Amino acid sequence: MKLTSIGLRKSEVSSATAGRIRRPEKLESRPNRSVVLGQQMVHLNLHERPKLIAEVSESHKGYSQLILAGEALRATASELLKLKRLAELPQYTPSQANQIDVIKKRHVME
């Protein structure tokens, strides 16, 4: 649509008829910035997800191994303390000697 300036004289103004004027098209509203950022993050997360899952599973595996190792160390230390207490006795009874053998076979010799 060509715009013209309005002059001082009436003859310089072009007539505007209904056939020549178009209705403006409906403007699209801008999407909310947080919605756009959220969609971009979802898109990024879908591409990053396999890497993140691999990293989480590796760290979970390491954490699980540390927990199991800690439990094994606690059990071994507990049994070694029992052995130490039994070894400090002046005399052993047959049941105490058997208990020492069981503890050694179960935890220390593994």
Image: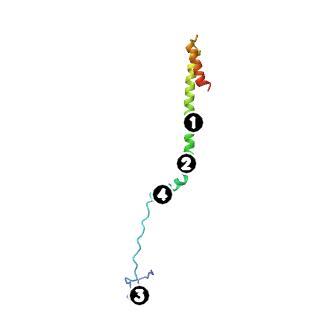
Q: Residue furthest bottom?
A: 11
Secondary element type, mark 4: helix
Of callouts 1 and 2, the N-terminal one: 2
Q: Which residue is mark 2?
A: 52
Circles 1 and 3 in contact, beta carbons < 8 Å = no
Q: CA distance from mark 4 to mark 2?
A: 18 Å
Q: Which mark is residue 65?
A: 1
Q: Position of residue 90 (x, y in %)?
A: 58, 10
Which dot, 1 or 3, sits closer to the camera?
Answer: 1
**Circle 4: is it few (<14), some (14-19), or many (20+) Cα within 10 Å?**
few
Of callouts 1 and 3, the N-terminal one: 3
Secondary element type, mark 3: helix
For the N terminus, the image quarter is bottom left
**Circle 2: is it few (<14), some (14-19), or many (20+) Cα within 10 Å?**
few
Q: CA distance from mark 1 to mark 3?
A: 89 Å
- Looking at numbered disc 3 in the image, what kind of residue is underneath it? Glu
Q: Which residue is mark 4?
A: 39
Q: Position of residue 23 (x, y in %)?
A: 39, 76
Q: CA distance from mark 1 to mark 4?
A: 37 Å
- Looking at numbered disc 4 in the image, what kind of residue is underneath it? Gln
Q: CA distance from mark 1 to mark 2?
A: 20 Å
Front residue of 21 and 54: 54
Q: Which residue is mark 3?
A: 12
